[in-house]
Amino acid sequence: MFATGLIVFRETLEAALFIGIIAASTRGLLNRSRWLALGVAVGGFGSLLMASAIGEISSWADGVGQEIVNAAILGTALAMLAWHCIWVSPNAHHMVQDAKRLGSMAAQGERSLWAVAVAVALSVLREGAETVLFVAGLTSSPDVSGVGMAVGAVLGLALGCLAGWLIYAGLGKVRPQYLFGITNVLIVLLAGNLASQLAKTANQADWISTLGESAWDISWLISNESALGMVLHGLIGFDANPSQMQVISYLATTVLIWLAASHMKNRLAPNRPSGVGVTPIHQPF
Amino acid sequence: MKTFSQIFGAGALCFVSLWMPASSSASEQEVRIAIKDHKFEPSEIKVPAQQRIKLHVHNQDPTPEEFESHSLKREKVIAGGGKAVISIGPLKPGRYTFFGEFNPGTATGVLIAE
């Protein structure tokens, strides 16, 4: 039961943290919960489909079907987060500052939430398909107690969701003027994590074999299997033993998205003094 | 703004060019292992260092398993009764542990490159 719970927890954690951060960053946008719930539902349904087709998928393209599907999932999710960081978030940032435009912010949110909803669906799909396979495998094993397994799986899922809720609630305590800044950094790091995993997948499929050696190995300090390692992986893309290409992809992605987002933020502030968008407007006495 | 676009473009280009496929010319070694009763057979494999290796994994259990290794940077689901080929290397001499993520208590193994 414990082993089952731990495995389900591990699979759930990454997606739950992802959703927690996205939910915190889109707080206050019209119909946000509906969009995110739709993402989770579509991702969950997709997990069932993908798990049932895993044998078929694996045999595609001389055995690299899984890598193709994973790369497509990671690449699309990365594009959605980049879009959100570069075009949506700088916009929302300024609209929140400008109370008169709150109404238009809600409308804008509605139009741009599809991107994060897709990213959420893909995150659930990636972790969910593995969970479904694992649990389905257990149910067909004669040597596992059905009740213990079910309890373990439900507990693991619940604990994973709790972790996601905790990050969401924790971010909820942040004062509104800092919230956007913090969630923007977190989402850029989530994008870096996706890029790093994309690099790992590309190496596994043999599409890129350069820079596949370890950049470092600190598993003696924090292993990927430890609780801290798992949480840090979900939050900032931690990997105890990444390849050089993973590190380069992570850094390049975070820096490029950050530069592009700052550039857009400045462009979207036509009436404000150049540079910083948070300059307060001084009221005459 | 123009400078920004130039820097951004150049950065993106550098990044993309890093991703170009590289040709692998080193000779390849084929290794076969099986998963049976949630265990790897054999669980210890010696392979030559500095060579490309094709690891053929045959899951003889009816349940799925995920072959995973942090040091080899590989994770691949293998359906019940299914087979998978995992390309690895060239490896530096050393020990590379791997495990079955769905049965980490029993499915463990190590690849020794020498």
Image (cartoon, coloured by chain):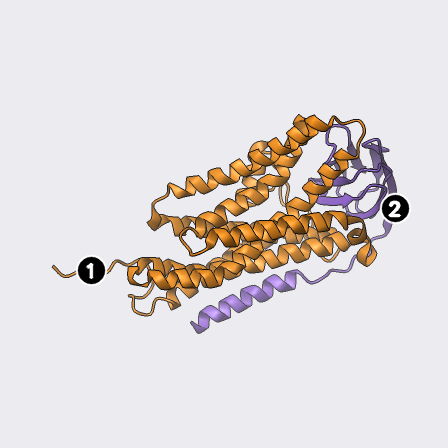
Chain colours: A orange, B purple
The residue indicated by pointer 2 is B30
Q: CA distance from mark 2 to mark 1?
A: 72 Å
Mark yes or no: residue A254 visible: yes
- The amino acid type, in three-letter code, at marker 2 is Glu
Quadrant where the N terminus of chain A lies? Answer: top right
Q: Secondary structure at mark 1?
A: loop
Chain of the residue that carries numbered disc 1 in the rendered image: A
Mark yes or no: residue A240 visible: no
What residue sits 73% from the left and 50% below the top? A204
For this rendering, which residue is in front, A138 or A268?
A138
Residue B91 percent coordinates (x, y): 76, 44
For this rendering, which residue is in front, A224 or A220?
A224
Do tags 2 and 1 sit on the same chain?
no
Label 2: how many Cα within 10 Å (few below 14, some 14–19, many 20+): few
* Number of callouts: 2
Residue A206 percent coordinates (x, y): 75, 55
Image check: A21 left or right of B84?
left
What residue sits 33% from the left and 70% below the top? A270
Label 1: how many Cα within 10 Å (few below 14, some 14–19, many 20+): few
* Residue positioned most to the bottom: B2
Chain of the residue that carries numbered disc 2 in the rendered image: B
Quadrant where the C terminus of chain A lies? Answer: bottom left
Q: Are marks 2 and 1 in contact (CB under 8 Å)?
A: no
Residue A100 percent coordinates (x, y): 29, 62
Q: Secondary structure at mark 2?
A: strand
- The amino acid type, in three-letter code, at marker 1 is His
In the picture shown, does residue A73 fall above or below B82? below
The residue indicated by pointer 1 is A282
Residue A233 percent coordinates (x, y): 57, 42
